[in-house]
Amino acid sequence: MYKDFYKPENYVNRELSWIDFNGRVLGEATDVSNPLLERANFLGITQSNVDEFFMVRVASLHKLAAANVTTTDASGLTPEEQLNAVNRKEHRMVQERYEIYNQQIIPQLAKEQINILHIKDLDQKQYEFIRRYFNDELMPVLTPMADDSSRPFPFISNSSLNIAISLRRDPTARQPGKRETLEGDQEVNKKQNEPHDDRQEAEIKFATVRVPEIYKRLVRLPGENNFILIDELVKEFLSMLFPGYQILATATYRVMRDMDLDVAEEDTSDLLRAVKHQLREREHGQVMRLEVEDTIDEWLEDQLIDNLHVSERSIYRVDGPVDLTFLKKLSGMVDGHADLRFKPFKPYLNPQLDMEHNIFKAIRQKDYLVQHPYDNFDAVVNFIHQAATDPAVLAIKMTLYRVSGNSPIIKYLGMAAQQGKQVTVLVEVKARFDEQNNVRWAQRLEQMGCHVIYGLVGLKTHCKVALVIRRDEDGLRRYMHLGTGNYNDVTAHFYTDMGLFTCAHELGVDMTNLFNMLSGFARPPYFYQLRVSPDGIRNFINQKIDDQIAVAKSGNPALIRMKMNSLSDKQIIAHLYDAAANGVKVQLLVRGITCLRNDLPELHNNIEVHSIVGRFLEHSRIYYFESNGHEEIYLASADMMTRNLNRRVEELYPVTQADTKARAIQIFDIMWRDNVKMRVLEGDHYERLDRDGAAPFNSQEYFVQEAVRLNKQDNKQQKARRHFPNVFETLSKHVPSLHLKEKDDANGKDD
């Protein structure tokens, strides 16, 4: 029984596993097979990853610890113990990040004449440039903020870059206090007041200046590909903001706050208003982490600690620039050096799914499986576009979790509503860090005439589905797109996701029931092919695992293969343990959090776990079961995480058509063969694979080359089609008696 595996030693802590995942991303920054500017980008990604981790996951642990919660997670750790373990591990990761920055990235960029310079490195022309830049651009925008008896310590907003300053009055400046005759209605002899007379206060003063976010962190200098960090530039001329004072010390710092959205939905009848209110409140969350330069003056550091109320474990002293996310922008600012970036490629768009063809006609004939970014996301956009403009389409229903800032899908949904079609859109306004964007889109959609739903009480709607109702010649028909990833045309260029276009009848009925559940009070008693969480996906996966166990117990081979972003659910992990213990072979592709360990003796080495971290973020979810010569494969929006299975509306759907099913299985096979970007789980940690002389195979690069090949193939076919009418026209001129038989014409009629 799988519950026998419910022991703390059988599980890896979720938060520590996440830090290990971020370490695998950091490994890409040191991988010399990656182009240099891409390595810098990976280093920047690790910083933004950990920022979000502290704003959400560490913030949750802080709240639990503050409430004196002593219950443990699956690995047996209390919230306080997890906080200590997380900070210890992240301190080591910070040290590693900055060693890579200082010892690898910066020196290797310099060899390529790409320089991030310091003040001491500037020549006269460059120094004059930054002086003018400060005076003309920055000086009018900067606001020095003092901390004294009349002005309290200013609020430091989340993730903002700031400069802490210690200063004292310049003894050579004009001294206050001279008695002067003040002329007015009556002459009075009195000391002349200053805007602020601080002689009675401490000699050393504290002030802070926020670096404005409207400017790029990297300032381009004269000379090709020379840059300087804006905070270093500001520090050089700070004295201009404090005339009459001497600058004693400066240091850049940054805070990460609790930014988790906590909406008490049961207490509000207006979710949109509640989210708006919580967004305002969130900005003032407790400080989770304080980053400072490791050269910071001790007095300045004490001032920050006292006023920001941070513990020693939450202070991160860094050997380099605070906040490395600027490295994500570096590649886009560097001129030339195409060889230092990934080679661009054109995603493949099946001609049947372009705007020159009737997509509904194509889907009616067969299903289409797409894998982004190798298959062009335009296929999805075109599907919604044609639905908006096709007079035979009656209604569009869609769920939106994350969309881009300038989403074409939003535009086409609005267009459909304005043309009189029934458009229903569920916009999940609780999508983490996209709340503000989604609130804006929800209001925009309503203004354009769409019916907008804001999600369900107590649940996030994370499923990715679109349903189009069309009146065909033979009656109403449902056309669908079901996906593993968001309807975001920007992230679709670097997230790997899969989607299915289909008009299968039973799946269409399920989709109607799903949307009725989301928009009304319907509670479908069952679904034919679709599995919906909460509950539905967990029950389904458990049943499939039990089926494989039964096959293995009967003496036949049984295989479970799963691909997901994260594997953390205690019950599902225990059930996989039970399957392995009973002889089922389990192969898992897990990009991120992995709370399972595969070194338990009871498992008989039946669980293999791979993790691929590469050029694209592996985001697709695949669930595959094989036994007795029978194969079933499913795609889903859900990972095997408790939140996805219990607290979100998610979808899992089958891929059944012979060619799409074979393609989905092939995609998993190809990724499993990867020996370049793949790491292998060894117990509770991942190791790079020793290829032992095998030829290198990069699955992501394989799919890129496949897209290139398909594009070339289509180009050849298009050229042939352009050439064919000329041949036919010439032939018909010379053979006027040539006729096509009516029978052949009838057989060739396109219906």
Image (tube, rainbow, N blue to C red):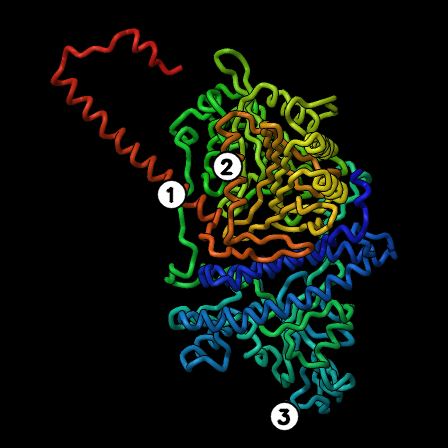
Position in image of residue 250 (x %, y %): 63, 79
Q: Residues within 10 Å of mark 2 (few under 14, many from 20)?
A: few
- Mark 1 or mark 2: whose residue is earlier in sequence: 2
Gap in angstroms between the C-alphas marked 2 and 3: 78 Å
- Please tell me the numbered disc located at residue 409: none
**Considering depth in this image, is 671 or 119 the residue closer to the camera?**
671
Position in image of residue 548 (x %, y %): 68, 32
* Residue identifier under label 2: 666
* Residue identifier under label 1: 708
Q: Is residue 12 left or right of residue 624?
A: right
Q: If the image is split into quadrants, where does the N terminus sit?
A: top right
Position in image of residue 681 (x %, y %): 63, 53
* Residue identifier under label 3: 172
Tag 1: amino acid: Val
Say which element carries label 2.
helix
Which residue is at 70% across, 52% downward?
A: 599
